[in-house]
Image: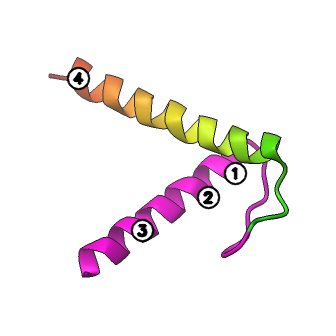
Amino acid sequence: MAKNKKAKAAMENFKMEAANEVGVNLKQGYNGDLTSKQAGSIGGQMVKKMVESYENSISSK
């Protein structure tokens, strides 16, 4: 169970970092006031960072 909390906290930090990078101000908890464009830009940035991370990991092998 502690592993799940740790993973959830890591994902939350990742989301906050991605939001900061695209200039969207997130707050802890509910962010239902975001526009679809803002939410999409956060998700897109997260995917971009995950792909870059994967590409870096396979190129270093």
Residue 58's label in the rendered image is: 4
* Residue kind at label 2, given as amino acid type: Met
Discs 4/3, front? 3
Name which quarter of the figure residue 33 lies in: bottom right
| Identity of the residue drawn at 78% across and 65% down | 32
The image quadrant where one finds the C terminus is top left
CA–CA distance in space, label 1 to label 3: 18 Å
x 46%, y 59%: residue: 11
Which residue position holds label 3? Answer: 8
Q: Which dot marks residue 20?
A: 1
Q: Which residues are magenta?
A: 1-30
In front here: 23 or 40? 40
Q: Are marks 2 and 1 in contact (CB under 8 Å)?
A: yes
Q: Which residue is mark 2?
A: 16
* Residue at x 60% of width, y 37% of height: 45
Q: Position of residue 30 (x, y in %)?
A: 71, 73
